[in-house]
Amino acid sequence: MAKGLDVGTMNILSGRQEGSETVFVQQRNSFVEIEYSDMAEQMLSRSEVLHIRKDDKVYVVGDDALNFANIFNKETRRPMQHGILSSDESSAIPMIKLITEQVVGEPSRPNERLFYSSPADPIDSPLTTLYHEKTLESMLGDMGYDPEPINEGMAVIYSELADNNFTGLGISFGAGMTNVCLAYYAVPVMKFSIARGGDWVDEQTAQATGTPVDKVTSIKEDEFELDFRTDVGGVEGALAIYYENLLDYVIENITREVDEEDVEEGLDVPVVVTGGTSSPNGFEDLFADHLADANIPFSISGVRSPDEPMYSVASGALVAARSEEGADEDAGSAETAEATEAAPESED
């Protein structure tokens, strides 16, 4: 049984097939440090709060980290920053390993196929993704999987555009990066990322309003809608301003890359927007409005978003993994058949 894994800056999600349903498991990709005490560790264990102890500290990991950060007035820490493993966080690898183990579980058989998301190198930053990609590959291999990276934007195409022959523009608005892929019959024509996403919106909003970043994140995830009926001076008004700026920046870079790649002007393709940053109500309509005003040299047949935009990348990675697993099984069956046909008949 194959699996798909979305390794995001804000969340890590896995997808696997159980009968006719796809089952997703999700954990927040963050942790918070608190002082150790016997009582605290006992209470955390009884409450099934994901945590680990190191010396005189306890690290609360995953979904509970944000709650503890708000209670203790602390900032969460992230194993990843700008879409890749954080070079500033000494605990990045052990923390992301713990979270990933919780999300993906043990392989159902040795060398189970697992496709994991990896961003493209950003075009607006000197960051590179090679170390991040290879570290995850090694970590997942040590867990017993046969891992393979899949471009995050291409995973969106696999997940959401099967009904259009895997042709269209897939955009994953993540926390650390925004990934873009234009594909034609499942062949990537253009793929890139930019080093801005939901974290950039939160950080700019926090700086503009004097609000802690984690508080801004909570407001965005719980209440925020892109309806532009909020006061400009509040957190939601600032979020709306920086969301618009992010969309304009993404579209500007799409237009530039399309020109540089010399994409055929006769294309008429749908656009799919996914990712946690695209979750607020009104995002899809706002992006369509801004896209309509852009000078992109091919036609857009429409903009759509899945019902669960958080799950698209994990779902697309699962589609790729199952396809590869099926191809491997077909190849193995063909080899077995050829060997049987070639074997000499035994003499009576």
Image (cartoon, rainbow, N blue to C red):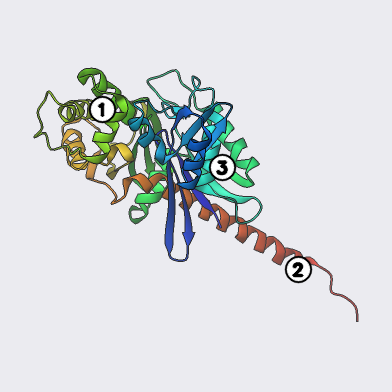
In the figure, 308 relative to 294: above or below? below
Residue contact at pointers 1 and 2, CB within 8 angstroms: no
Few, some or many C-alpha atoms within 10 Å of disc 2 (few <14, some 14-19, many ≥20)?
few
Which residue is tagged 1? Answer: 246
**Of marks 1 and 2, the one in the foreground:** 1
Spot occupied by residue 211 in the image (x, y as percentages of width and height):
24, 23
Q: How many marks?
A: 3
Is residue 124 left or right of 290 when viewed as pictured? right
Few, some or many C-alpha atoms within 10 Å of disc 1 (few <14, some 14-19, many ≥20)?
some
Q: Between marks 1 and 2, how big is the CA–CA gap?
A: 59 Å
Mark drawn on residue 340: 2
**Of marks 2 and 3, the one in the foreground:** 3
Give the camera-side residue of 275 and 32: 32
Q: Between marks 2 and 3, how big is the CA–CA gap?
A: 31 Å
Mark drawn on residue 301: none
Residue contact at pointers 2 and 3, CB within 8 angstroms: no
Q: Secondary structure at mark 2?
A: helix
Q: Between marks 1 and 3, how big is the CA–CA gap?
A: 30 Å
Q: Quadrant of the N terminus?
A: bottom right
Give the camera-side residue of 335 and 110: 110
Q: Quadrant of the C terminus?
A: bottom right
Is residue 201 left or right of 22 when viewed as pictured? left
Q: Quadrant of residue 238?
A: top left
In the figure, 54 relative to 144: above or below? above
Q: Secondary structure at mark 3?
A: strand
Spot occupied by residue 161 in the image (x, y as percentages of width and height):
35, 51
Mark 1 vs mark 2: which is more N-terminal?
1
Mark 1 vs mark 3: which is more N-terminal?
3
Which residue is tagged 3? Answer: 148
